[in-house]
Amino acid sequence: MLHANGSLLTVDVGDRTAETTNIDDELEEFVGGRGVSTKLAHDRIPFDADPLGPENRVYLASGPLQQSSMSFTGRMNMTGLSPLTDGLLSSNAGGYLSRNFVGTGHSVVEVAGESDELLAVHVTDEGVEFEEVPELAGATVPEVTEEMNERYGLEAENLVTIGPAGENEVRFAAAMTYDERAFGRGGLGAILGSKNVKCLTFEGDSAPDVDLPNEDVHMDVHRQAATSDDIFRRQGTTHLVQVLNDNFSLPTRYFSEMSFEHAEKINGDRVEEKKYKKAACSVCAFACKLPTRDEERGVETEGPEFETVMAFGSNSGVGDIVDVMKSNGLCDDLGMDTISCGNTIAAYLASEDEFGNVELIHELIEKIARREGVGDKLAEGIDRIHEDLDVENWSVKGMDFAAHDGRVVHGQGLSYAVANRGADHMYSTLMIPEYNDVIPAEGTAGKADFLIDHENRNAVRDCAVLCQFGLGRVIEEDVFEALFEEDYEDILAIGDRIVNLERHFSNQRGRDADDDRLPYDLPDLESSIQEYYEARGWTDDGIVPGDLVADFAQAADD
């Protein structure tokens, strides 16, 4: 089966050491990206580790397709023990980092320990250098890029950077690359902050060889990406704003309403009007990114995408796309997940009856990133502060909800309940077949097997590492089989192992069926959760039996 090649580089920022390890066996079994990172994290992070303590580790990993010239492959994976969800969590980001990363000769870089000084860590194909950078304390993401460029000629595409939010251990701090692409959900930037790592840089010309089969399939995918007239190429995911508002649900005013009267002022058409050029990720011809600008108000950013429009638009009661653009830009500069930041601010606006107060919203973004005033409380996320705010807890396992509303697309609601990283739509993307009438939107009964197939497929997507925009448009089952030279069911089996490892780790931290809950009722939810457990081979309490992971898991405390 196709898999990444290259070593594991362990960088201990406390001891200022770097060690290279052969992980061929792990790569053969888990492909790369999220898979191999989950395997390593499960085996090397103690089950009782503090997410913000020195025993936590964070993994950056490529997959095998980052050495192809195929569209939808300009991405990287990042994995760690999440400060927001308290479980293993993976996120991926686009941009131009991946090709520079594989040029170092490594398939995975593991950051361990805790530095007593703020560091820039420089990884090349010749070794690792540790640079103390106390002068960059509090610097924004673009300021760090500018400094690395002046000193070493490095560009945004060489960097993984945290802003003030990561330094201050905001639980939903993002790690940023290419300045505006985020390893967003779950607070992975806070892990780097806890280790006192301001940025990591990657460059080299020593990419390991990867045998890429069926290159004609790669070219066909690339051709279809280049010639598609898909609306997502013009409007990104913001095309969904009006569609969901009119036909399904657009969470509004901290999830208290399900449609927004000003949706047309923040929809894809408004974003497209502000788009001033095309942009893409590395080698991708789909070119879906959204560089936007409003010259009159001096706002320029990349985006916002749909989830950001929901969080800082409808869910915050804001009906002006330029205001949402500014919120997006501030979060990118300061290094925060726009979904969690926007939703947490929406919770505060609900508590203060201040929906639509744009000046307050932008002030709160700054305060959260720097943990100043009420921002210190909000930096903890909705799950930890909802009682103090006297608002409902719109989160699962600490992860606040994405825009795709499980109260309307019920299978997606089931997914939020059982997903190892909580209310994150990308874990299964089950809302897509529900929106498209492949399966009915209403009800959860009978959807467990369908959900498991989607979770497993998406786990492999994140091993490859592939963009979600390619799936279902160009990359169907037959293309998966051609890319991996493996039967589709065997490919899904890799995803099954990954989901089981994530769940097993959470079980060791005390997570069970009691954590698989929603703040609303859905038809047959409890029986559907049990159906899901049974299909996964878990116990009625949501526990992964030891023999189910024994063949591919090593206890982290052995």
Image (cartoon, rainbow, N blue to C red):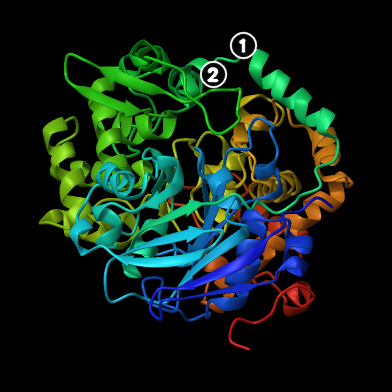
Give the residue type at disc 2.
Arg
| Residue 499: image location, x then y, percent | 66, 60
What's the residue at 45%, 28% (across, down)? 249
Of the 4 image quadrants, the one containing the C terminus is bottom right
Q: Which x, y percent locates residue 292?
A: 34, 21
Mark 1 element type: loop
Instruction: Residue 422: give x, y in percent of width and height.
Output: 50, 54
Q: CA distance from mark 1 to mark 2?
A: 7 Å
Q: Residue at x 12, y 56 (%)?
A: 372
Q: Secondary structure at mark 2?
A: helix
Determine contact: label 1, label 2, CB under 8 Å.
yes
Q: Are there few (<14), some (14-19), or many (20+) residues within 10 Å of tag 2? A: many
Residue closer to the observer: 308 or 58? 58
Q: Which residue is mark 2?
A: 233
Nearer to the camera, 309 or 129 = 129
Q: Residues within 10 Å of mark 1 (few under 14, many from 20)?
A: few
The disc placed on residue 229 is 1
Q: Quadrant of residue 115?
A: bottom left
373 or 74: nearer the viewer: 74
